Image (cartoon, rainbow, N blue to C red):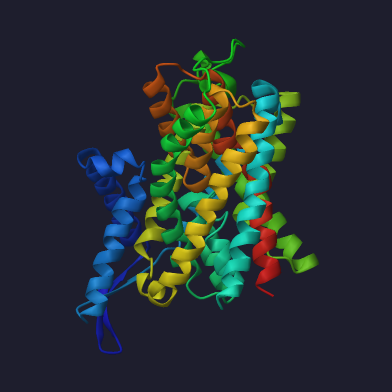
Amino acid sequence: MGFEYAGKLLTMKLDLVSTTALAAVLLMLGYGIRRRINFFEKFCIPAPVIGGFAFAILALIFRETGTLGFKMDTTLQSPFMVAFFTTVGLGGSFGLLRKGGAALIIYLVTCWFIAVFQNAFGSSLAYMMGLHPVLGVMAGAVSLEGGHGAAAAFGPTAEQLGVKGATAVAIASATYGLIAGSLLGGPTAKWLIDRYKVSVTTSTEKYESFQDAVGASNEEDKVTSRNILSMLALVLVVMALGSWISGKIKDVTGFVLPGYVGAMFVAVLFRNLNDAFGWVKLRLSSIDIIADVSIGIFLTMAMMGLKIWELYDLAIPLVVILVLQTIALLAVAIFVLFRLLGKDYDAAVMCAGLMGHGLGATPNAVANMGAVCERYGVMSHKAFLVIPLCGAVLIDLVGIPNIVWFINYLAK
């Protein structure tokens, strides 16, 4: 750690260890703030976003007043990011499709359609307003269905392809999505129930809990140092293979496939082969801990380095794109998904979930559904199985390749 002048601005240089230490401190600060301020809990704002964004605001103030700049070594951000997407891939078991039945298939296909639509719609709107169309993708499935994790991952990829401001747009859009998705989920379900005079009764079919479906409640899945170490070894091996495959694809085809995407799909392939042949006992609770630590540090680092000043000229077009994206998702929920799912109480609850993770993240979806079920006093077990399986596990099987294709195609 040291100081130097960048032009006339005094700049603090943070080395790899100092940057990582600062990220860890800001992450814990984010958790502390979220516990104490109800707004952040209510809208499921992630702790890395709170802590990292607070630092980004401070850095903006220092920069605008000419007080101090920051130069950080974020070398470890990439490995943490790849580790997180690898854990996502390890959850992508095709066997889970059987757990939710027809409702899961309908909901999942709808989500895959939305992922493609959000990118096509966003890029078209951006082009019509004179912006680079990739910025519309950043305000599409990258940040809305993808959330802050995908925003922080794909923003730098787009910037490497020459799209200035992509990370700032993606992060800002993801933050908007968390709040909008939380605000609209409950009212959407209530309007559907009132409008169609839906009987407040749930399916009589037997549905597992999400934890039972993915095997996380298994007695053998206890968190121990040995289990964490064995799953960390698996994650690292998959990361290495994914990075190598991504590099080979780029060499052969010229198609930019980021290392974290390659790792995720190697993980998906391994998970489904492992389900069939039982090579390794997967400890899902230990994998979840690796995922939480990875996304916590990676996302905090991404937020710390956010260049908020790059949003100055994009504010009004970005608001227009996000508002239209929100209206489009509402239309899909009301006029498509609700009908496909049978226009019953479970369908209304799942529409609340769709607004949550179609604009924000799976925790928002769960919070929305919980609020609806609490309001009517009837728990929708179908919704609480289907939405987490799709939002947290299966949506990325199409969502991620869709994003990669749009960015590569539109950045040409």
Q: Position of residue 185 (x, y in %)?
A: 45, 38
Asked if residue 245 is positioned above or below residue 46 in the image, the reply reads below
Q: Is residue 174 left or right of residue 309?
A: right
Q: Is residue 191 left or right of residue 125?
A: left
Question: Residue 256's image quarter?
Answer: bottom right
Residue 155 spot, x, y in % from top left: 52, 64
Question: Is residue 85 among the parts visible in the rendering?
Answer: no
Position of 124 with respect to 323 (left or right) is right
Q: Quadrant of the C terminus?
A: bottom right
The image quadrant that residue 272 belongs to is top right
Q: Position of residue 76 (x, y in %)?
A: 45, 58
Q: Looking at the rendering, in which quadrant would you find the N terminus?
A: bottom left
Is any part of residue 261 visible from this angle? yes
Give the answer, above or below, for where 90 lies relative to 210. below
Residue 252 versus residue 303: which sits nearer the camera? 303
In depth, the one of 149 and 89 nearer the eye is 149
State the residue at coordinates (24%, 48%).
29
Is 344 or 317 nearer to us in this picture?
Answer: 344
Numbered label tally: 0
At horizontal 30% and vertical 39% (from top left) the residue drawn is: 41
Tell me residue 8's x, y (percent).
25, 89
Q: Quadrant of residue 302?
A: bottom left
Residue at screen point 52% across, 17% down:
199
User: Residue most toward the bottom?
Assistant: 7
Rendered view: 209 above or below 314 = above
